[in-house]
Image (cartoon, grey):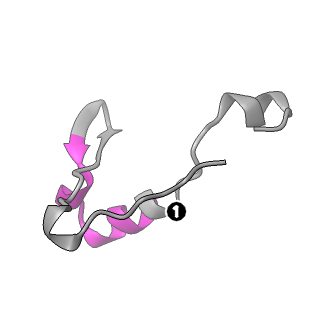
Amino acid sequence: MHSTQQLPEDQRQRCEVWTRVMGYHRPVTAFNPGKQSEHRERQHFTEAAARGSAA
């Protein structure tokens, strides 16, 4: 089981997410609203799920 610990708001910082699109790596914040929406709806590949075993 994982325990989570929250940092105080003044110690937190935004994490910039980059992804590969059309052969280039770009920050998701640079996407237009439609592409940002598509990125949020993506389903991520996991090897365990592809094998059909429990994660």
Place of residue 40 in the rendered image (x, y in percent of width and height, measured from the top left): 45, 62
Residue 23: name its quadrant. top left
- 10 or 49, which is in the foreground? 10
Q: Amino acid at mark 1?
A: Glu
Residue 46: name its quadrant. top right
Q: Is residue 32 found inside the magenta-colored segment of the image? A: yes
**Can you say whether 43 is above or below 40 in the image?**
above
Residue at 16% from the left image edge and 62% from the top image edge = 11
Could you tell whether 42 is left or right of 21 in the image?
right
Judging by the rendered image, the residue that carries numbered circle 1 is: 41
Within 10 angstroms of label 1, few (less than 14), some, or many (20 or more) residues?
few
Report the number of numbered marks. Answer: 1
Place of residue 21 in the rendered image (x, y in percent of width and height, measured from the top left): 32, 40
Predominant SS of the magenta segment: helix
Residue at 24% from the left image edge and 33% from the top image edge = 24
- Which quadrant: the C terminus? top right
Residue at 20% from the left image edge and 62% from the top image edge = 12
Helix, strand or loop for disc 1: helix
Place of residue 52 in the rendered image (x, y in percent of width and height, measured from the top left): 86, 34
Which residue sits furthest left? 10
- In the rendered structure, which segment of residues is drawn in magenta? 26-38
- 9 or 49, which is in the foreground? 9
Q: Is residue 29 found inside the magenta-colored segment of the image? A: yes
Residue at 24% from the left image edge and 66% from the top image edge = 32
Place of residue 17 in the rendered image (x, y in percent of width and height, measured from the top left): 28, 49
- 11 or 38, which is in the foreground? 11
**Can you say whether 19 is above or below 52 in the image?**
below
**Can you say whether 12 is above or below 9 in the image?**
above
